[in-house]
Image (cartoon, rainbow, N blue to C red):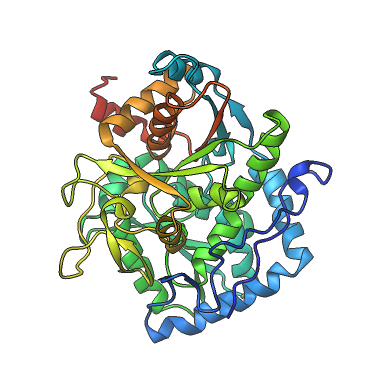
Amino acid sequence: MATPPPPTHAATDATSPESEAPVRATMAVPDADGRFGQFGGRYVPETLIAALDQLAEVYQKASNDERFWDDLRQLEKHFTGRPTPLYRAESLSRHARKHADKKNHGATIWLKREDLAHTGAHKINNTLGQALLAKRMGKKRIIAETGAGQHGVATATACANLGLECYVYMGAEDVRRQHLNVVRMKLLGATVIPVESGSKTLKDATNEAMRDWMGSVETTHYILGSVVGPHPFPAIVRDFQSIIGRETKAQSLRHMEAMPNAIVACVGGGSNAAGIFFAFIEDHDVRLIGVEAGGRSSNAGDHAAPLTLGSPGVLHGSMSYVLQDADGQTQNVHSCSAGLDYPGVGPEHSYWKDTARVEYTVCTDDEALAAFTLLARTEGIIPALETAHAIHEAVRLAGEMPSDQHIVVNCSGRGDKDVDEAARLLGIES
């Protein structure tokens, strides 16, 4: 079944530019089989085909139903707090100019403040939309996977608001390093299920969530948290997250009186990056840069950078770039950031890489931790460790660009959840 076009509605006041219907991006919109070039598709057991067909059909009908978008707009505006600000980071920009190699270099850095959305990250954009779809399907039991816990918190939040039962799978290692979000999920009424298998991180949590869904498809909807997985999930999650890019485009035209010269976002599964990139994908004068987790080194098991160091393969139901060995076995990964600690990536990002529309690079653990501290001390904003990867690249890139140019960073989440782990890694004593 063909995926419908992304919604033409933004979660803002009807008189604001963001509420105008966006120009639909056509590059890499998946075909009828959910393919982005060679990537995407469905590689799942037969037991899931009917559920995926049902989801695609319900989403197509919802996309053409003004009442669905009215319900979502009201939640986004009055519950989530959209639109999120586009913030001019003057002190961070001065830092970039001070360290630029050339005179009159050092672009202005702006932050798209998704960390100010309710629950503290962009994840709520997708969970509210999918929870509304679940209600349309008559499914009252929700499952989700989570790494850094932000998707788990956002899913638990949407379920609490809409009266749905919530179960969240989370790797035991992530339960340890993201304790705050575990408590938040439980307070919101979710059941958190630690996963002890494998590396005890996001990949293993996704494995267990998929197993649950295979045995409960009649009553359960799986709110997948990123632009990964089998069709139609990559397009659905991208569409719900595309509000970020639509707002950014309107805000840039208002505040900069121009389009940004570059947009930077971190990439794990890739939902925050897809959300901000998609509105600009056909604006070829705007550079799009995705930043993966470089971890400790480029050696296998020391990083989580499938687009930079991986190869095409199948993971969790779709074809994408995957970190795998010569026999096709998924490799272990590492990142200081639980939300980037994943061996695969969304198929649309894989397509954008192969078509060279988006540039992908890496940021090491040490660089991310330095950027985490830098943003806190220059702007009074403590970012998520995921976001810190993008901050590092934006500062580096700004130093190479003329001072009259502009960079937007998707500030995808706040760093409350990471304070204890960052303190441990940085050696900060309480």
Q: Residue at x 61, y 46 (%)?
A: 245
Residue 17 placed where, x, y %?
77, 42
Which of these two is toward me, 426 or 238? 238
Which of these two is toward me, 186 or 68? 68
The residue at the far right in this view is 15
Q: Residue at x 53, y 64 (%)?
A: 28
Residue 10 placed where, x, y %?
71, 50
Relative side of 222 to 56, left or right: left
Figure label count: 0
User: Can residue 159 be seen from the camera position used here?
Assistant: no
Residue 384 placed where, x, y %?
42, 36
Quarter occupied by residue 69 = bottom right
Relative side of 374 to 11, left or right: left
In the displayed structure, would residue 398 be above or below residue 189?
above
In the displayed structure, would residue 391 be above or below residue 39?
above
Residue 130 placed where, x, y %?
58, 63
Which of these two is toward me, 203 or 368? 368
* Image quadrant in which the C terminus is located: top left
Quarter occupied by residue 422 = top left
* Image quadrant in which the N terminus is located: bottom right
User: Can residue 17 be seen from the camera position used here?
Assistant: yes
Relative side of 321 to 302, left or right: right
Q: Residue at x 64, y 70 (%)?
A: 4
